[in-house]
Image (cartoon, rainbow, N blue to C red):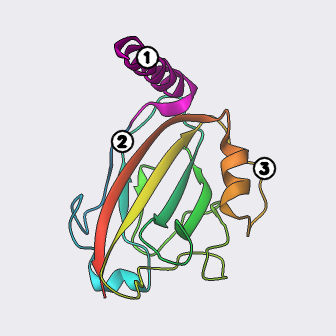
Amino acid sequence: MRALFAMVLMLAAVGGAGAARAGGATMQLTSPAFSAGAAIPRRYQDHAPPLRWSPVAGARAWAVTLQDPDAPMARPFVHWLVWNIPGAAGGLPEGGLPAGAVQGRNDAGGAGYYGPHPPSGVHHYHFKVFALDAPLALAAGAELPALTAAMRGHVLAQGELVGAFAH
C-alpha cells in the first residue's frame, strides 16, 4: 500500500512539473478594486474591475477569463472571455479594453463581461490571466472550449485572482 501511495505521489509530482513546463508558470494578478479573497464591490456587476498583472518575458498577447465555479446550473459559469490583449499591456482599465482585444461568449448568452449575479449565497469569482507567446486566431464570440483549445501550446504563464460576491 505504501509503495502504491509513493507511486501516486511521484506521478503527481511529474505531472505537476510537466504542467509548469507547458505554460504552468505562475505570475501575479491583482486589482486595485479588491484584494484576493475579499468582496468584489457591487459596482462591478455592470462593468469589469481594473486588473493588473506582472510582466512575462516573451508575452505577445494576453487572455483573461472570469468564471464562477459555485454556480448551480453551469459549473463553472463563464462570466467573461477576452483575448488578444496587446503584449505591452500590464493590465486592463476599469470597464475598458485596449484596441485589438477580442471578447468571447459568456454563459449568460452574450458577448463580453457579465458581472457577478449569484442567485443566493456567496460565490467565488476566479479571474485568470494568461501570458501568450502569440495572438490567437480566434473569432469574436468564441466560447471557453474554443479559447482553451486556441491557447494550447501558447501559454507562457498564468495568474489568478479570486474575489467573493454575495447577493
Separation of marks 2 and 3 at Cα, in angstroms = 24 Å
Residue 49 vs residue 66, the one in the foreground: 66
Q: Which residue is mark 2?
A: 54
In the displayed structure image, the side of residue 116 where residue 154 appears, left or right: right
Amino acid at the residue labelled 2: Ser
* 145 relative to 22, above or below: below
Q: CA distance from mark 2 to mark 1?
A: 40 Å
- Looking at the image, tell me whether mark 1 or mark 3 is earlier in sequence order: 1
Q: How crowded is the residue under tag 3: few (<14 C-alpha within 10 Å), some, or many (20+)?
A: few
Per the rendered image, the range of residues in magenta is 1-26
Query: Residue 23: within the magenta?
Result: yes
Residue 10 is inside the magenta segment? yes
Name the residue beneath numbered marker 1: 4
Residue depicted at x 70% and y 56%: 145
Q: Which residue is mark 3?
A: 137
Q: Residue at x 35, y 87 (%)?
A: 120
Instruction: Residue 64 in the image: state x and y as whole percent.
Output: 52, 56
